[in-house]
Amino acid sequence: MSWSFLKRFEGLVHPFGDAGGESDIRRVGALEPLPREANRFIWHFAAQAKWPFVALLVTGALTGIVEAALYAGVGWVVDALERSSPQSLFADHGLLLLGLAVMTLFARTAVLFGATVLEQQVLVPSFYNRIRWQSYRRLMDQSYTFFQNDFAGRISQKVQQVGEATGDFIITLLQTFWSFITFAVLTVAILGAMDPWMGAVLALWTLGYAWIVRELLPRIRRTGRAAADARSVVAGRVVDSFTNILSVKLFDTERRQDAFVRDGFAHSLEATRAMTRAISAVRVAVSILNGLMMTAIGAIAVLSWRAGGMSAGDVATALGLILRLNQMSGWMMFNINGLVRNYGTIQDAVATVSAPPALTDARDAEALPRAEGRIEYRGVSFHYGKGGGIIDDFSLLIRPGEKVGLVGRSGSGKTTLVNLLLRLYAVEGGAILVDGRDIATVTQASLRAQIGVVTQDTSLLHRSIRDNIAYGRPDATEGEIEAAARRANALDFIAELRDPHGRSGFDAHVGERGIKLSGGQRQRIAIARVLLKNAPILVLDEATAALDSEVEAAINENLDAMMEGKTVIAIAHRLSTIAHLERLVVIDRGRIVEDGAHAELVRAGGLYARLWARQSGGFIASGAAAE
Ligand SMILES: Nc1ncnc2c1ncn2[C@@H]1O[C@H](COP(=O)(O)OP(=O)(O)OP(=O)(O)O)[C@@H](O)[C@H]1O
């Protein structure tokens, strides 16, 4: 029998919740943050698959009813057997027996089938995927700072956890929990009708059960939440060790790193143990409670039979129901454990997944049209959220088409200034204007579309060379991609690339963060990418630092061509690479200390002249490098 017909049910819940496709994702922009409170977070997603969940509620109730009916059926059969002779059984009770057979065979199977398909086909893969995808999408709206302040591994773990925890929570609640409640209510009703004392025992049992849920379960929730958090800390540390493996190896810090990770594992272990202790306490309490309940009901049933109040069939029904109740209630505690643990995981994850992005587009932000390239820093202050320092009241005007070199000691704030222009951080005072428009009033995407950036350490995505070059312009043709690679002097080495899966040339994958390429090769890919993007403003932050002089000389011509007609901000410690630019702005502690052309600054004998002298071997010459 082919089970492929089950596929029909798989598309009932959309696994992403958006139309998808690159253009759609780009157009949507930043999304509303997800609810920060666990209940509202759960509801937010439950509402996205309302009908399957309503159906689950129905199958959950039917499961409970069928369960109870089966035990009632046992009683009817016992009574029928007792009251009939073998010869007259079918004549007397044939219809009843047939009805029970039909119920057992068809109704029960149909309900079970419906519940299973709802859970396994309609909900689990699609719904979980949808939560994870939507959480990931929200996280991608977070600022650069957000990712600098956290571990990538920890965040990714939250995305995985929150999908599973939310899905499991809702399904357990609507299916397992709900069918148990239906069953328990029917049990109380059936037994209460047989003998009020049995009803009273079950009422007491319910109170005891409620007490355990109220008193003992919160401990599982608290400890469960701490355990989930400790687990994601471990994941963060483990991923951090793996991604920084080179530093770890080079500095022989393996032991220390081990200790750091081990400490994370130990902490997680402690947190998990606290949770498992709470679980044991609950299990023992339930076991004692159920023991008391079963003994009492059993005794009442036997005594009542002796007194003629109950038939043998009633006793069979009562014993069957309470045995099942015992079994189910243990299973239920297990599920409530899961339920509260999942709830704790959701509470823990929403703090990350639903955090509102710190840096968002203004509500009425417009797209910045293709820029002329006029850049103005107007009294900009920025201290990375600290009290002061880094950049204070910084003003600089760069005219369209001007090529400016930023010079300054390490840590003087050069990269910070260009990151502010890119709005990776929001200024804390003053404003930055592009073409006279405050960059805080335009969309981040349209701003960044106007700026091509090459940095010293470009990390590439683990995709093909082609995808990496076309990243800034997905609609580029094969010819354009190749031309950009040629101009970046990258064609030769690309032709020789081959990855472990046998893909070569432009199809070769580059390893995580481009780790399988040399620094210079990565930089050439980054240059090709920016050439292809062809943005009117260029930021070159140590753009050729990783290249040897030969390659640098070979692509300099192309770089000059690339700069043609564009506004350029170039940063380089090797002053010879930027000395020829028409304007050099010298920065010290976030302030401009000199501003002029190379020859002028060398003549002035200030900070630039000193830096230049040191690099050119003590010989203060004007113009030598400016050719
Ligand atoms: N994410 C951050 N959080 C807090 N402080 C930071 C952060 N990034 C940089 N800084 C601080 O800001 C100052 C300026 O750093 P920046 O990277 O802008 O300097 P730079 O001039 O580009 O240096 P280099 O030439 O070494 O690249 C430094 O003192 C640095 O410690």
Image: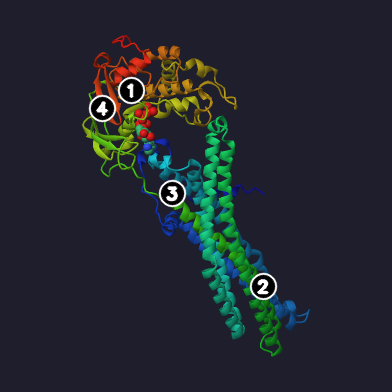
Q: Residue at x 54, y 49 (%)?
A: 231
With respect to residue 309, does 421 lie above or below?
Answer: above
| Residue 323, disc | 2
Real-space CA distance between mark 3 and mark 4, rounded to the nearest whole angstrom: 39 Å
Question: Which residue is label 4 attached to?
Answer: 592
Answer with the quadrant where ligand 1 appears in the image. top left
Question: Which residue is label 3 attached to?
Answer: 352
Q: Secondary structure beneath disc 2?
A: helix
The amino acid sitting under disc 2 is Leu
The amino acid sitting under disc 3 is Thr
Does residue 627 appear to the left or right of 210 in the view shown?
left
Q: Secondary structure beneath disc 1?
A: strand
| N-terminal-most mark, 3 or 4 | 3
Real-space CA distance between mark 4 and mark 1, rounded to the nearest whole angstrom: 15 Å
| N-terminal-most mark, 4 or 2 | 2
Q: Position of residue 134 (x, y in %)?
A: 44, 46
With respect to residue 100, does 299 lie above or below?
Answer: below
Q: Nearer the viewer, mark 4 or mark 1?
A: 4
Q: How many marks?
A: 4
Callout 3–callout 4 Cβ contact below 8 Å: no
| N-terminal-most mark, 2 or 1 | 2
* Residue projecting furthest to the left: 436
Q: Position of residue 479 (x, y in %)?
A: 43, 19
For residue 142, say whether it is visible: yes
Residue 602 falls in image quadrant:
top left
Question: Which residue is label 1 attached to?
Answer: 570
The amino acid sitting under disc 4 is Ile
